[in-house]
Amino acid sequence: MTQPISLLLGVHAHQPVGNFAAVLEEAHERCYRPFLHTLHRYPGFRFAAHFSGWLLDWLLEHHPQDMALLKEMVGRGQVELFGAGEYEPVLASIPQRDRIGQIDALTAKLQRRFGAAVEGAWLTERVYIPTVVPALADCGMKYVTVDDYHFLCTGKEADELDGFYTTEEDGRSIDLFPISEQLRYRLPFSPAAEAVAYLEGLAREGHRAAVYFDDIEKFGIWPETYAWVYEKRWLEQFIEGVLASPLIRTETYRDFHAAHATRGIIYLPTTSYIEMNEWTLPARAAAAYDELVEREKREGRYERSKPFVRGGIWKNFFTRYPEANWMHKRMLALSGRLAALPAGGRSAALTDRLYRAQANDAYWHGLFGGLYLPHLRREVWHNLVALEAALDAAAPRPPLAVGDADYDGVRELVLCNADLQAVVKLDAHAALCELDAYALAHNFGDVLTQRAEHYYHKLNAAPPSAAAGGEGIASAHDRVSFKDEVSPADTAPDARPRRALLDAWHRLDGETAWPQYAAGAFRAPLMSAAFAAPLDGGEVAKTVTLAGRTLQAAYRLRDVPGGRFSVELNLAMPSCDGFAGRYVLADGSIPCGFGQPLDLAAAQRLTLEDGVLGGSVRLTASRPVDIRARPHRTVSQSEAGFEKIMQGVCLTLSWPIDAVLQELTFSLEIVADKR
């Protein structure tokens, strides 16, 4: 007699820290609420759920009735709540002490607010590295879910993945459940009856369990899914089909784990799900990987060779995107400074700042915006800058320091006072990669550079309208669509990193050269740094100085032939192309917003007012200069399609050079609004 298969169904709910309130509300209305209300009507359908701590707090505050519904389902044994890091960090990317702190924080919240016994953990983006095992075990986690791909990479066969295995690291053990890729691509995209039939087929083949744990946002937020899952009743049909089948029973992970023994010891490689392993690769490598996969599929070998056709690892994002690497290494350094404080100085508020800055979303990019979304990076930087200000008050730093914080082989000069911090990359550009205003807890240097992405080849592809075979709906992984019109020029890589104080020399013959600076004197008492570069037989000297809330840049050109000199300032302005960001001229008039082009001739003052920031940047030049202002946009993909996103304001100051000696000084004064 055929034994019923145990369906271990889990859903993962998360919104990035700092996401827009309107996005959260839409996600709740189109996904979280209807999913919970639908499942509540079927108490016999048991499942697991993981809500990230920040999203859980938001739901408890804004939708307490729905959270009361979830608590009722937990109380009656229908729902098992999974733990994880409080702010959804990739555990592999944060220190051991923070792994334990974040996991314990969410576990305590689930116990306090829902009366939940937490034994299982969701692994963010299923990023597995053996060194996370001790933290999970030390926090009382008995099991975690990772992809079946992780297991296939060890040589396991698909028919061996109907239970859980045990691994150990540094004397601590934990059990590992393999999430079925086949189920991930079927739920909820294939017709409900087909999904139920697939599970029944597994039961007839003798499988003990079918393991599913994936984003709940696929049940209502991804394109077409709301109508498919709720209006066309996919979810109800699937639940009723499962409950009516004598070959399927639903179980929580806890109950299955308690009733079965491990299938044995296993050691998984450092990896994530298949799509992520491709996203971590730089464009050329990703193209080669994609070509290899397609060839294996064409020749019918892919299912056999898939475990051995591996992409990169999650931490490759720090090598792909210098902005992510810089943010990550700044976070690690501040975590160390916080841990070094005496026990009485490590307050809950400071720890919370650190944990918020460890939220995974802004550190990587794949199908989803992530790193490309400036409001997500801004939230990380907001917490990093606020934490640093508090740490400086508790344990002051030197006002000037030199080091290589991001391990890229190029040193950085850090200048800081009570108001500002400027970080100069000591390469040939001698430009700022970070400019922090402590009163605003904002990094004006957080501007993303436009780079080549492997998926740009899809820009010429015809978007599929539905799933293969004409039934069901297409997954966002298979969809090509456009939120904005994108031209080839929009995807051209930037020639230089998007920094502040990027200089250029424009000769009379139309040629442009970039000064190649060498570092000169760094003077801590004056909070300044001097640089010099040869320029067409002459020399340009550049001095960067901090004075209170003002950054000053002074240029001195000697014996340089006729031409124009320009200075480019890339500034992260939170309003971007929204209505709250605008330029203000010296006479008080407002020509346009940050999203529009602006050209000024012989100007000496320009103010950038930003309502979202709650402050302004006042630009003042010692002599009239031409000012060219443009929005800087990048092109990226998301589950909703290709889109252009404004990353910052690009100001270019230029003036003619027609004498033996030319000098110009300009300043950026950063002012917080009076509240």
Image: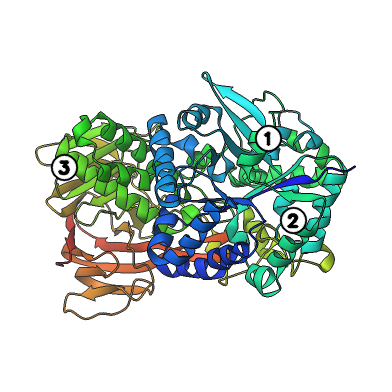
| Pair 1/3: label in front | 1
Number of on-image labels = 3
Q: Residues within 10 Å of mark 1 (few under 14, many from 20)?
A: few
Residue, x 33% and y 63% (percent of image)? 574
Kind of residue at disc 3: Ser
Which residue occupies the extreme front position in the image? Answer: 76
365 versus 520 height, above or below: below
N-terminal label among 1 and 2: 2
Whole-percent x and y of residue 42? 65, 62
Q: CA distance from mark 1 to mark 2?
A: 27 Å
Kind of residue at disc 1: Ala
Whole-percent x and y of residue 158? 79, 37
Between 595 and 675, the one nearer to me in the picture:
675
Residue, x 49% and y 26% (percent of image)? 134
Left or right of 337 on screen, residue 220: right
312 versus 8 height, above or below: above
Q: CA distance from mark 1 to mark 3?
A: 67 Å
| Residue 671 visible at all | yes
Question: Which residue is label 2 attached to?
Answer: 186
Q: Residues within 10 Å of mark 2 (few under 14, many from 20)?
A: some
Kind of residue at disc 2: Arg
Marks 3 and 1: in contact by CB < 8 Å?
no
Question: Which residue is label 1 attached to?
Answer: 259
Residue, x 17% and y 53% (percent of image)? 552
Query: Residue 486 appears in which quarter of the rendering?
Result: bottom right
| Residue 640 visible at all | no
Q: Residues within 10 Å of mark 3 (few under 14, many from 20)?
A: some
Query: Residue 387 appears in which quarter of the rendering?
Result: top left
Q: Which mark is residue 528?
A: 3
Whole-percent x and y of residue 170? 51, 19
- Quarter of the picture containing the C terminus is bottom left
- Quarter of the picture containing the N terminus is top right
